[in-house]
Amino acid sequence: MIAIWLAYLVATVSASGVFMVAGRRSQQAHGFTAHIGYQNPTDSQSWQAESDFSEGRPQADAGTALRIALRRLTPLMASRRVQTDIAAPFGLLVQMRASALADLLEEMLSAAILAAPASRLLLTAAGNGERVAICVTDDMPNADAALRRATVRGLMDRVASRGATLDIDVRPAEGTMMTLHLDGVAESRHRQSAGLGTLA
């Protein structure tokens, strides 16, 4: 029993280390300006902003859209034994309708879940100048870079048609990071720089 407990403790510490590194790599790669705070995405408090999700608005809240996409995929995550951590502030607005953004994020998350079963995903959203970067990072080592890019080629085309970009960064020893870059909204950039955004 003690051996099992020790093995679990070592695995937990190792996983925490991987995601601390992934979080730093995500911030360094995109110059994130928002403070990152980690929280369990299944916490009921993390869904409070969903009531602000409006189909008709020309801007979308990145944190809200990410959580809605995540909620839609709960059954798939359970079946593939995928766990998630999220660090995405509310109030970070992008130039895209909320329903369209949630659909793109759902497809992006689905691709990560299917490509990395029994893994752990780190989801982040933060501002970078006039752009907003939403990242999905998995901890599946030895991924086939060409295959990972091929599986999301159609998604990359749909993202491009909406004036955004999707980057795939595959690092054999660490995992894969997919980053969706979108145009931000000046008002939300001001709120984030003033420290008024609410973290997940």
Image: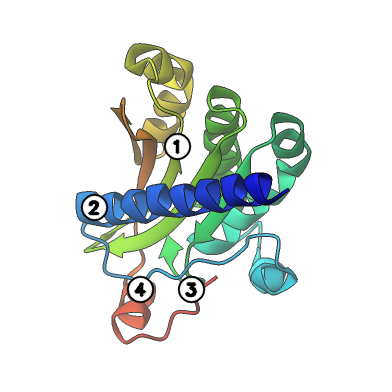
| Amino acid, disc 2 | His
Mark 4 crowd level (few <14, some 14–19, many ≥20, 10 Å Cα)? some
Report the residue at 34% width, 35% height from top: 174
Distance Cα–Cα, label 1 vs label 2: 19 Å
Q: Earlier in the sequence, mark 1 or mark 2?
A: 2
| Residue kind at label 4, given as amino acid type | His
Question: What amino acid type is highlighted by mark number 3?
Answer: Gly
Q: Is mark 3 on a helix, strand or loop?
A: loop
Label 2 residue SS: helix
- Mark 4 or mark 3, which is nearer to you? 4
**At label 1, which amino acid type do we have?**
Asp
Q: Distance between the residues labelled 4 and 2?
A: 13 Å
Relative side of 41 to 34, left or right: right
Residue at the disc numbered 3: 91
- Checking the image for residue 139, the label placed there is 1
Reading the chain from its start, which is encountered first: label 4 or label 3? 4
Label at residue 24: none
Q: Quadrant of residue 46?
A: bottom right
Residue on which the image places disc 4: 35
Reading the chain from its start, which is encountered first: label 1 or label 3? 3
Residue 129 point in image, percent of width and height: 21, 64
